[in-house]
Amino acid sequence: MYERLTNLRFWLLVFPAGWLTMVFVLIAFWPDPGAESPEALASEVTNALRTHDFRKLQPLLAVGGEDVAKSTVEHFATATVDGGQYRDGVVVVEYTRSGTHGVFRMPVEELDGRYVVNAVITPTG
């Protein structure tokens, strides 16, 4: 047994096999993006914006990834998030900035049975 543990060839075979096993296990347990329900999504989005954590917001977004998550969180950097809720197909985040109350609406989409928000603002008209 001691000879096997000191043999370099043994470790050159065991290390890559262990590494690949670890990668497969991490991928298998990787959380699915989005939330199980629109109400849970509203709660998670509100908490992410309240704590200014773009990493918590990123898996809840339908499009844009890290860049959109960072810019959305930066939008709330000087604001106090008062609350958020799901209403009529939209997550509504209520906030206060410099004494002025405002709301930020993000449409909810369903992707593969999970709910995500679209924080990209598109012009209307």
Image (spheres, rainbow, N blue to C red):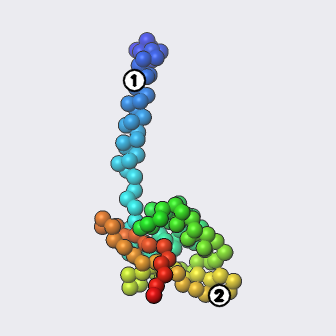
Q: In front here: 63 or 12?
A: 63
Quadrant location of the C terminus? Answer: bottom left
Instruction: Give me the residue at 37% from left, 70% from top.
Output: 115
The image quadrant that residue 87 belongs to is bottom left
Tell me if residue 79 can be seen: yes
Q: Position of residue 25 (x, y in %)?
A: 37, 43
Instruction: Give me the residue at 62% from left, 78% from top.
Output: 80
Instruction: Give me the residue at 37% from left, 73% from top.
Output: 109
The image quadrant that residue 101 belongs to is bottom right
Label 2, label 1: how far apart the Cα atoms are: 63 Å
The residue that disc 1 covers is 13
Q: Position of residue 7 (x, y in %)?
A: 45, 15
**Left or right: where does residue 98 sit relative to residue 17?**
right
Count neighbours of disc 2 (C-alpha within 10 A) and say few if under 14, some if 14 to 19, many if 20 or more: few
Q: In front here: 112 or 35?
A: 112
Count neighbours of disc 1 (C-alpha within 10 A) and say few if under 14, some if 14 to 19, many if 20 or more: few
Name the amino acid, label 1: Leu
The residue that disc 2 covers is 100
Residue 80: numbered disc: none
The image quadrant that residue 10 belongs to is top left
The outermost residue toward the right is: 98
Name the amino acid, label 2: Thr
Q: Are marks 2 and 1 in contact (CB under 8 Å)?
A: no
From what the image shows, is residue 109 above or below residue 23?
below
Q: Position of residue 67 (x, y in %)?
A: 54, 63
